[in-house]
Image (tube, helix red, strand yellow):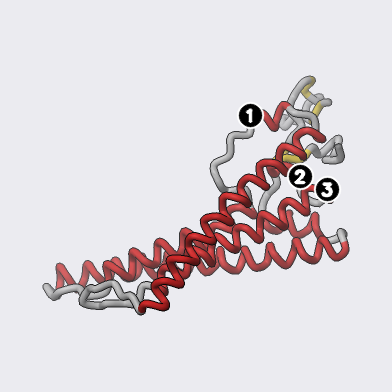
Amino acid sequence: MTRKNPTGGHPAAGAPTEAPVRGAADHAARAGAAGAVGTFVRAVAAVSTAFGMLSVVLLLLAVFVVCHMVLVRYVLVESVIWQHEFVTYSLIAATFLGSPYVLLTYGHVNVDLLPHYLPPGARRWLAVLASILGLMFCAYITWQGWYFFHEAWVDGRTAGTVWNPPLWVPYLTLPLGMGLVCLQYVAQIVALIRGIEPPFGIRDPIAGDAP
């Protein structure tokens, strides 16, 4: 297979034909004509995108609080009470709550050397296997995270600092974020099997994704 030379000349023989998916918008467009399955995939993508936006807000709040902490500590020469913990918990929450969006847009570190050289059918089933393994790992983390959250909630645990926030609040972000990652994995597996989603975000614009 060949692709058009980007300089405007003739197609370059033997050039790779795969092109990466460009993100949530492209993902939703591909799921648009897939009926009920496509509706499910789009709904999960919308939830993942919303939590991705929430993680951005948390990161911006953390940056603002760091600036406030510097002002209070080094300009006003006053003690800081809650700022360190707020920044720490915000970064943790942003990490976990933003994870499903990162999965949706294939933003995680991904070694795709083997998938690039596999035929479309083998590439698709390798992606399904990888997604199932990822789902199993994230389901375990969700279960463990729920245990820590529930324990902190029932026991009324707090941070034990001057600010002393309840620990169930930051602990909740672990099972919630990983649970949403599991949901995104389920949608990804369904989309891969139904041919809605290209494996590893790699699609062939000439030959298509069908095995």
In the picture, the disc for residue 198 is 2
Q: Residue furthest top?
A: 13
Q: Which mark is residue 193?
A: none
Secondary structure of the residue carrying tag 1 is helix
Q: Quadrant of residue 152?
A: bottom left
Q: Which structural element holds mark 2?
A: loop
- Residue 177 relative to residue 128: left or right: left
For the C terminus, the image quarter is top right
Residue found 86% across the figure and 59% down from its top: 34
What's under tag 1, amino acid-wise?
Answer: Leu
Measure the alpha-carbon separation of dots 3 and 2: 7 Å
Residue displayed at 67% across by 46% down: 131
**Mark 1 or mark 3, which is nearer the start of the sequence?**
1
Marks 1,2: beta carbons within 8 A: no
Q: Position of residue 67 (x, y in %)?
A: 28, 67
> Which of 163 and 79 lies nearest the eye of the viewer?
163
Figure label count? 3
Q: Residues within 10 Å of mark 3 (few under 14, many from 20)?
A: some
- Identify residue type, mark 3: Gly
The three-letter amino acid code for the residue at tag 2 is Pro
CB of mark 3 within 8 Å of CB of mark 1?
no
- In the image, 202 versus 40, the foreground residue is 40
From the top left corner, tell me how far across and down residue 178 is, in percent: 55, 60
Position of the N terminus by quadrant? top right
Q: CA distance from mark 1 to mark 2?
A: 16 Å
Q: Which residue is identified by label 1?
A: 113
**In screen coordinates, is 185 left or right of 178?**
right
Identify residue for label 3: 195
Spatial CA span between label 3 and label 1: 21 Å
Side (left or right) of 68 relative to 110: left
Q: Relative to 32, is 72 above or below?
A: below
